[in-house]
Amino acid sequence: MHAALIPPEQIDDFLILRARKYTSSTRRALTRDVLQAENLPVLEWQLLFSIARFGSCHVAFVTKHTSIDPAHGSRAATALERKGLISRCEDPSNKRRKLLSLTPKGIETVERIWPKAKAVTAQFTNRLSPKDFAELKRLLDLVNGAALPLFNAQEAHAEGTEIETEGVTEQA
């Protein structure tokens, strides 16, 4: 047995705990109130939503612009294709990649789920005034954007490409 090792004031500044609590609560409510009835796991919904958001695209594009892991995204794409919600076709600009597109059934599914998903999220965000909600979005964009230069530098380094950071082009 031992006492707490991390002082409460340090925990208070460890924002990942607050962010995780919010996203976990929202995800549980979305799963319980919407996705279970659709027989659609959260990851499959995230990919389906991403295709609806971005338009026809490949898995690598989705995983680069979301929090979806590439391997999980690929498995979700296979499951969605089996369910008839997406189709894959050759990317004319890169023959090695397949574009993911919503099928008519996929479009119908997104149109049915999206309003319900927004309503679930609103249960949490409606606790904020419009001004506070706008500020929350601004702050989240700010901290998420702060991670982009580091992420882009690491990604470019792995690919051996040039990157631009604050107006300076570097060879990674």
Image (cartoon, rainbow, N blue to C red):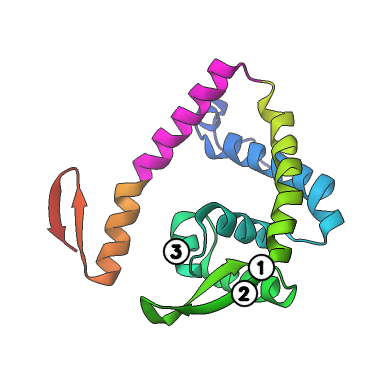
As shown in the figure, which amino acid type bears the numbered disc 1? Thr
Please report whichever mark, 3 or 1, sits nearer to the chain's N-terminal start.
Answer: 3
Callout 2, which amino acid? Ser
The answer to whether mark 1 and mark 2 are in CB contact below 8 A is yes
The C terminus sits in image quarter: bottom left
Distance from disc 3 to disc 2, alpha carbons, whole Å, reads 16 Å
| Disc 3 + disc 1, Cβ < 8 Å | no
How far apart are the alpha carbons under marks 3 and 1? 19 Å
Q: Amino acid at mark 3?
A: Phe
From the image, state whether disc 3 or disc 2 is nearer to you: 2
Q: Please tell me which of labels 3 and 2 falls first in the chain.
A: 3
The residue at 56%/59% (across/down) is 51
Q: Which mark is residue 33?
A: none
Regarding mark 2 in the picture, which secondary structure is present there?
strand
Q: Residues within 10 Å of mark 3 (few under 14, many from 20)?
A: some
Q: Secondary structure at mark 3?
A: helix
The residue at which mark 3 appears reads as 61
Instruction: Name the spot of residue 107 as percent of width and height, x first.
Output: 68, 59
**Left or right of 32, for residue 163:** left
Q: Position of residue 136 (x, y in %)?
A: 52, 26
**Magenta range:** 128-147
The numbered mark at residue 103 is 1
Query: Residue sitting at 55 percent across and 32 percent down?
Result: 11
SS for tag 1? loop
Seen in the image, is 33 located left or right of residue 161? right
Indicate which disc residue 87 carries. Answer: 2
Q: Residue at x 60, y 34 (%)?
A: 18
